[in-house]
């Protein structure tokens, strides 16, 4: 894995932006940066969730809360809105004099078969997880290039290198995020600014409770929640956050977090027809969902994971998801606000 240490960013005491910082992995990345002495400016879509995040970052980083020295500065900003992102970044640059690190974590997960998927699902995924990183990167690049150093990190997914059944809008957006970040890295060679592609596998962030289930919600939850919770299949979110921050600060080209991710990426590179065939077999085992009908722009109700769990009422699924549920309580994952 290539690194770029020729224009190092501060090991501590720098300024970081985290897009999607209010909960889940983005919250834990913010905590990790704050522990290393960074002043973290974090954005999200819901003020209440951000306020809770600020309290969590202050407590877990051991750096207190409030005043000019606060380790976490929240800002309500939707990464889908280019003007809002530009305004947010400009305000941080004006206040701090520059930005050393920018990490895009914001994301949504929509689970269901393509027969239940609409244009709206694709637009939401692409606007958040592809255009969001575009907006952040274009906003921070002028100040980073002027300073001759900077680190950009974009969290993609194993679903961005191998398309996963029942996660098609998610995979489309994450594939784009991989292409964006790899292209940025090439374009920025020699400038002192690096771009790191983060390719996690399943992580125990608790995100299954806020996932949007667009097909047969209860049956999809029954496989998705355990898959995102079992230790053999998933990595602890705190450990993932540490490795992400390590890789981005070091200027690595890629950060891969689980053995399944590494194996899947390499096998797909060598034998893509094989991995697509395996995914096809997996798709046949997953539940069908209600058809969206003849209109591709129609909309179906989106059921959250938390609601699907209540409807399902399965003690077995609850037992298999217990680690993920515990993670949700640690990572501010709630269904009453945006990420």
Image (cartoon, rainbow, N blue to C red):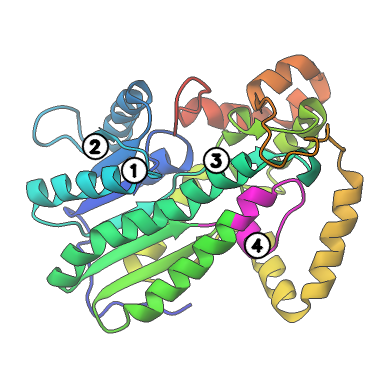
The residue singled out by tag 3 in the image is 108
Dot 2 or dot 1: first in sequence order is: 1
Residue that carries the numbered disc 4 in the rendered image: 261
- The alpha-carbon separation of the residues under discs 4 and 2 comes to 31 Å
Q: Mark 1 and mark 4 in contact (Cβ < 8 Å)?
A: no
Residue at the image position 78 percent from the left and 27 percent from the top: 317
Q: How far apart are marks 3 and 4 (CA)?
A: 20 Å
C-alpha gap between disc 2 and disc 1: 8 Å
Quadrant of residue 207 within the rendered picture: top right
Tell me: 224 left or right of 120: right
For label 1, the residue is 30
**What segment is highlighted magenta in the picture?**
156-172
Q: Label 4 near label 3: C-beta < 8 Å?
A: no
* Marked residue nearer the N-terminal end (3 or 2): 2
Residue 301 % position (x, y): 68, 25
- Are the residues tagged 2 and 1 within 8 Å (C-beta)? yes
Sequence-first disc among 3 and 4: 3
Residue 86 in the image: above or below residue 288: below
């Amino acid at each position: 894995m290539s690194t770029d240490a020729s224009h190092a960013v501060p090991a501590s005491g720098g300024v970081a932006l985290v897009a999607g910082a209010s909960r889940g992995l983005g919250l834990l990345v913010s905590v990790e940066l704050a522990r290393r002495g960074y002043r973290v400016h974090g954005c999200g879509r819901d003020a209440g969730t951000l306020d809770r995040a600020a309290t969590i970052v202050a407590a877990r980083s051991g750096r207190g809360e409030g005043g000019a020295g606060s380790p976490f500065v929240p800002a309500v900003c939707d990464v889908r809105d280019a003007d809002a992102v530009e305004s947010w970044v400009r305000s941080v640059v004006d206040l701090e004099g520059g930005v050393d690190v920018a990490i895009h974590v914001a994301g949504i997960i929509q689970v269901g078969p393509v027969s239940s998927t609409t244009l709206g699902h694709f637009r939401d995924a692409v606007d958040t997880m592809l255009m969001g990183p575009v907006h952040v990167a274009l906003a921070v690049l002028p100040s980073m290039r002027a300073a001759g150093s900077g680190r950009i990190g974009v969290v993609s997914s194993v679903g961005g290198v191998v398309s996963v059944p029942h996660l098609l809008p998610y995979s489309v957006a994450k594939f784009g995020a991989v292409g964006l970040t790899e292209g940025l890295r090439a374009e920025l060679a020699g400038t002192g600014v690096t771009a790191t592609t983060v390719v996690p596998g399943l992580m125990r962030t608790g995100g299954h409770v806020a996932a949007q289930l667009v097909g047969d919600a209860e049956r999809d939850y029954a496989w998705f929640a355990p898959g995102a919770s079992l230790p053999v299949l998933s990595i602890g979110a705190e450990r993932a956050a540490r490795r992400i921050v390590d890789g981005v600060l070091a200027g690595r080209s890629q950060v891969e977090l689980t053995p399944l991710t590494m194996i899947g990426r390499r096998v797909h590179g060598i034998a893509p027809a094989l991995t697509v065939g395996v995914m096809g077999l997996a798709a046949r085992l997953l539940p069908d969902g209600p058809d969206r009908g003849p209109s591709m722009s129609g909309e179906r109700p989106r059921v959250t994971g938390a609601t699907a769990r209540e409807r399902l009422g399965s003690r077995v699924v609850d037992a298999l998801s217990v680690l993920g549920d515990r993670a949700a309580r640690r990572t501010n994952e709630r269904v009453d606000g945006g990420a």
